Image (cartoon, rainbow, N blue to C red):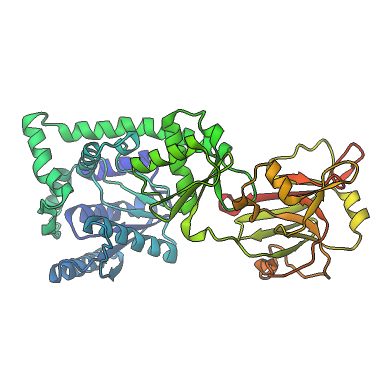
Amino acid sequence: MITSKIKNTILARRMIEGGDNVLVGLSGGADSVCLLCVLNELKDEFGITLSAAHLNHGLRGDEADGDQQFCAELCDRLGVKFYSKKVELNADGETVEVAGRKARYDYFAELKAEFDFDKIATAHHADDQAETVLMRIMRGTGISGLSGIQYVRGDGVIRPLLDVERREIEAYCRENALAFRTDNTNSDTAFTRNRIRVELLPYLEVSFNPNVREALCRLVSTAGEDGEFLENYAKRLYKRLKNPLPTSEVCLHIPSVMLAERPIVVRLLRIAAEDALGVFPQLEQKHIDDILKLMNECKSGTSLDLPNDLRVSVNYDWLTFSKQSEVQMFGDFYLEIEPNQTYEVKKYGVKINTKKIKINEKKIKTNESLIDFNKLTDKIGDKKLILRKRRDGDRMVVYSDGRTKKINDIFTDMKISRFHRDRQLILAVSNEGPVNVPAVGSANPLDGLRQKDLNNGEVIAILGLRVSEEYKVDKDTTEGLLITYESIDDL
C-alpha cells in the first residue's frame, strides 16, 4: 500500500519529527495531490501540523488560475491551511523550467521564514528520479550528479514520494476517487525532461531493459552513498583548511588543497564557493577547470569572475572566494572593548569574546590572542582598548629591545594579502576619550561600530596573528586577557 511505503520512507530517512510544521508544495497534479492526502492521513500519527502552498506562474492563463482554485478547494475540504501567490515569471536568460523552479522554491522559502515551517514537502517521485539521473548522464555528470534528487535537503526540503512510482500514485488517486489537474505542457517534447519521459524512457524499456527506471534508481542509491561519503569527507577537510583569520572572506590554503585528490579538491572548491555566496554555485566543469588552472599557476593578484557574482582570487598561497559586488574595502570603524564581554561585529562576520584568565600553560588556538593582563594594565593605565582597522603609520614592537616594525611590513612578511589587510582587526590603545559601546545582551550591541578619524594609538596585537613584544605572555605571567573570535555563521 502506498501509504505504508511513504510512511516507511519518512521514518527511514528521518524526514519529520513530532511537532513539525510541514508545508506541502501543491501544484494540483496527481503527485502533489497524493502527497498532501497521504500526509493528511498520517498527520495525527506523526504529530505534525500540515499546510499547503501553490504558486501560480501565470503562464497558462485560465488553466493556471483553474489550478490555483482547485488547490484552494482541495485544502478547504481537507481542512488544511492554504497559501497561494500569483507571479509574472521572468526567465531572464534562463529556461522557463529553471525560472519556474526557482520561483517556486523562493516562494516556499519566504513562507518558511515568515510562518516558521520546519519542513517543505515536495512531490518528486521515483520516475522523476530516473528522468533526472538519465538527463544528467547525457550531460556528462560526475558522481554527485548521479546522486540524483535528495530525499532530505539541508534547507528543510523533503521528498517523501521518492520511493513511489508514478503508476502507484495514479492508482492511489483512482482508488480514492481523487481528482487532479493535468498540465498539458508536461507532454510538450520541446522540453528536454519531457522528451526523456515521453520518448527516451519508453524506448529504453522496450528495446533494452523493461526495468530501466528501477535500474536508474538503484544507480542513484549506490552513487548517493559514495557521493555522501566523499562530500562529508570534503566538508570535514574544508573546516581544517579554511582560512582562520578574523575576516568574512572565504579562503583555502592552496598548497594544502593541492595535496588532496582531484575529486576532493573539486568538492572543496564548490563548498568554498557556496560558503562565500550563501547559495549553491552553478559552476560547470569549465569553471572548475579554470579555478584549478588559477591554483596551479598560483600568481598572487590574479583572479576569475564566474557566474552568480563569484570572484576567485589568488593572494600569496591563499585562494579567496568572494562576491564581485562586495570586493570594495570596508570603511574604518572603532570598537571599544573591555574584559569579560562579548561583541558581534557583523561587518566582519565575527563574534569577539574578551576574557580575563589565569595562565596555566594555556594553548592558543588559531582564532585566539593572549595578552599579559598585568603588563597591559601597568602600561596603559586608564586608557581604553579598541579594535580597529590598520592605519597609515601603524607600528608594533616586534623585537625584545623595543624596536618596532611597520604593520604593513609585518603583513608582507606573513604573506597577508592586501585584500585581507584591509579587513584585519588591530588591537590598540585609544588616544581618545571613552566611548560607550554596549556588549552583546545590551540594547543595540552593534552600535559599537563607529566611523571615526582617530589618532593612532599604540598597537598591542594584530588579532589572531601576532602580539607586541611589550605585551606577550612569558614565564612570569600570571593573568592573561584572552581574545577569541568566531564566525557568526558557525555559531
On screen, 141 above or below 123?
A: above
Rendering quarter of residue 134 = top left
In-image side of 305 versus 171 (left or right): right
Write the residue at 29% across / 36% down: 146
Does residue 247 appear anywhere in the picture?
no
Residue placed most toward the observer, 61 or 345: 345
On screen, 445 above or below 201?
A: below
In-image side of 229 versus 490 (left or right): left
Residue placed most toward the observer, 86 or 323: 323
In-image side of 189 versus 334 (left or right): left
In-image side of 464 versus 283 (left or right): right
Where's residue 100, x and y in %? 26, 60
Write the residue at 93% across / 54% down: 378
Where's residue 67, x and y in %? 18, 66
User: Can you say which quadrant of the picture contains the N terminus?
Assistant: top left
Where's residue 131, x and y in %? 20, 42
Write the residue at 57% across / 49% down: 490
Write the residue at 77% across / 56% down: 394
Rendering quarter of residue 414 = top right
